[in-house]
Every structure is written in structure tokens, then in C-alpha cells.
Image (cartoon, rainbow, N blue to C red):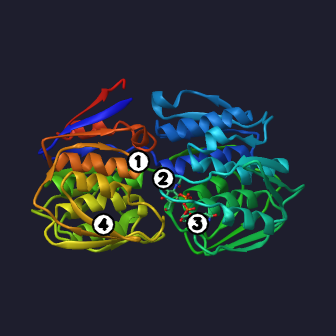
Amino acid sequence: MDSIVIEGGTVLEGAVPLGGSKNAALPVLISSLLTADKCSYDRVPALRDVRTTLRLLSRLGVTIERDVVADGRLELTADKVHEREAPYDLVKTMRASFLVLGPLLARFGEARVSTPGGCAIGSRPVDLHLQGLERMGAVISQDHGYVDARARKLRGAAIPLAFPSVGATENLMMAATLARGETVIRNAAREPEIAELAAVLTKMGARVSGAGGEVIRIEGVDELHGVSHEMSPDRIETGTFMVGAALTGGDVLIEDARAEDLEAFTAKLREAGARVEREAGGVRVTGNGRARGTDVATLPYPGFPTDLQAQMMVLMSVSDGASVITENIFENRFMHVQELNRMGARITLDGNRATVRGVAELSGAPVMATDLRASVSLVLAGLVARGVTEVSRVYHLDRGYEDIEGKLARLGADIRRVDRDD
Ligand code: UD1
């Protein structure tokens, strides 16, 4: 199993390219199920979650042409979909697999998808997905760990979401494109990935308006057609490099980064003392002495993203003063805390609130990754820790970061991947 070994104490400097957005790519690739035509995608990131999605689509009968690892280009054709079932072994490794439910049901009238169950960061239910589909006329039953959904033809419905869930908004938006009549999703998630999926669906012939806002309207059509789309750059990868630059007192240009998608995060980084400037080529972040303690609370977009909470906590761990970090999206997204404390951080937990007392220095240690964003936070911590940090179980990291060690090494970090066969 691979580990990442980092010798701390280097400063990140230079320019770094971004991969395509993971959270945009997964629903967009899945939306290819809505048409029998060929769909072409560019800037598809070579990530483990993308490969899992392709394995799932291929198992359903989607034809996959071209190799994503080679040049980020993919062609998917869902003209011979022979399976309607997303099995447990794929859904359990990646919750986004559940997004095939809406498209399969809308196009073929039936779908059977394993329930995701728990994962390291919390119970993560799918009740909002199911309630929405029921409102659209689906008959849903659950047995043996699977959700079974049927509807000869979905019908448009008013769907008020109790919480602006990203996944539920995407699943319902895709289902509604082929329903009869108008669907109105209220309290919809407003993440940029929602607007991106809506733009793709619109290019496919769907009639979607309001995506990116709280109310999304979808007027169902009889069929959708093929599309060509280039994925946006990954905003969470962007934020991760921004923290890396601030943390090491470096100077990094994050190429093609879209600052407008990260305003709440950027405001907090500035409050902590980093310099963040928009440039023609992207976003430049310059460290500016020791960071200041800054309180952070995660919220649905446009609030501070939960996917950058762990990275921000590393910056707070070595900042001057104390900060309180409140996690409002996931119930158990603090697994990095124990590991950061083993590296000398002073963090205490009380429910969904972490109090971080900044220390002058972290010390390198063997640590274990527990989920995607926790693992990258340990890599960041290793960059500023004294001595060597070895992060094990980096398969979590490979779910969402493309060649992170190569990119950090090119910015000057002393970092390498090693194969530990124990
Ligand atoms: C997506 C992102 C993930 C990000 C998260 C929140 C993808 C592939 N993943 O995950 O990186 O951290 O948004 O920004 O885009 N919930 C329910 N019932 C539901 C659905 C969700 O209670 O039916 C709860 C979840 O348990 C969680 C919260 O809502 O506490 C947010 O979940 P959601 O927005 O759905 O996140 P994902 O789509 O899973």
C-alpha cells in the first residue's frame, strides 16, 4: 500500500496547474445515462472516483472510448444500457454512485441501487433523494440493502428540500429532465457544480433554469441528445494549494483558478493574513508571516466549504492565537484532529466544534489518512512539520487529488510516494 513521505520545512513557490473538478465530473459523467447519443468530455481528472464511476457506467452497459489517464478526454455512449442495478461493491466505495438512480429511473422506468450506508465522515442518508423521486411519482421500496425505484413515466413536481443537499439536487435535477411537466426544486444546493451540471443538461436539450440559485425549474422533455463538455478546474484542489502557499509562507500561482467560486474561503484566508490576488492566469497566494487565528464555520455554498475545513484547520494549528472551527455539514468530519494532535497540534473537540490553539511548530510523525480531505490536510501538515511525516493509506487521497505529490514537488516540497508492501 502506498504512503506519502514528506520532509517538512520547504516553501512552496511557482505555478501549479489544476485538474478538472471531481465533484463536477462525477455527476456530469453519470448524466450520459440520460441519452443514447455519444457524449464527449474533456479535462476529466484521472482520479480513483472517476475510475469507479466509469466501472459503474460500464457495468450498466455504457460504452467507454478513450483513456482518461492519457489526455483527460472521454467519450461515453449509453445506447446499450442492459443493467439497471448499481451494486453494493461500487456504491460503498463512492457515494456519488447513488446518482445513477435518477437518470436510470427517468430513462428506463426502473432502477435498483445499493444504499450507501455509513462512511467515515457520518451516516450520510439519502432520504432527500428518495422523497423527491416519490413526489415525482416513483414507487420506492427498500430491501436487502437496495433501493428499488419504479415509475413508467416520472411527472414534474414541487420539491422543497429540507436541506440543500448537493447530491439530492443533482439526482432530482437529472430525473426531472425527462419527466412529464415542470419540476420546481426549492432550497436547492447552490454549489458551482450544480450550475455546471445544469449547463451540461441544457446543452443536451434539457430545459433547466435557476441552477446556482435556491429555486431550480426543470421543464421535462421527451429525450436528450449528445453533448461535448470540458470540466471546470477543481475548486477544492484550488483551495488546498491556496492553504499550502499561505502555510509555508510561499508564493504560488494557481493556474486557471476561479476565485469567484471560493469567496467565503478566500475571505477567511485573508482574515488569517494571507495575500490573495486574482491575476489573468489564475489566483496568486502569498504567505505573509505567521497566520492569525480565525474562526470558521462550514456552510452550504456560498458559505465556507466543508471540503476545505481540514486544510484550514492545519493553517489554524500553526497560527498565532486560537480559533474555533465549526462543522455544520457532516456529523463526524474531524478525524484529522487526532492525527494533527499527534503531530503536536493543540485541538480539542466538543461536538461539531473544534477549538484550535495555535502552536509555533508541528513535528513530523507517522499518520494515517481516514478520508479524502483529512488525508490532504495531513500532507499539508507534513509540509510545515519539523522532520519527516509519513501519511499512510493514501488511497483516500487518490480518490480526489491528481498527482498531488508531483505537483507539490514541482513547487519545491520534499515529498515522495513510497510503496509499503505491509
Ligand atoms: C457533495 C460533495 C462533497 C461535499 C458535500 C457537501 C460530490 C461528489 N460530493 O457530497 O465533496 O463535501 O457535497 O458540500 O459532489 N443529507 C441528508 N439526506 C440526504 C442527502 C444528504 O440528510 O438525502 C445530509 C448528509 O448526510 C450531509 C449533508 O446532507 O450531512 C450534506 O450532504 P450532500 O450535500 O448531499 O453531500 P454529497 O452530495 O454527498
Q: Is mark 4 within 8 Å of ligand 1?
A: no
Q: Nearer the viewer, mark 4 or mark 2?
A: 2
Pointer 2 or 3: first along the chain: 2
Please tell me whether mark 1 or mark 4 is closer to you in this view.
1
As rendered, which of 158 and 181 lies closer to the eye?
158
- Quarter where residue 264 is shown: bottom left
Q: Which residue is mark 2?
A: 120
| Kind of element beneath mark 3 | loop
Q: CA distance from mark 1 to mark 4?
A: 26 Å
The residue at label 3 has a CB less than 8 Å from ligand 1: yes
Which residue appears at 19% of the width and 64% of the height?
Answer: 274
- Determine which residue is flagged by label 1: 370
* Disc 3: which residue: 165
Within-10-Å neighbours for mark 3: few <14, some 14–19, many 20+: some
Report if the CB atoms under discs 1 and 2 are less than 8 Å apart.
yes
**First-in-chain label (1 vs 3):** 3
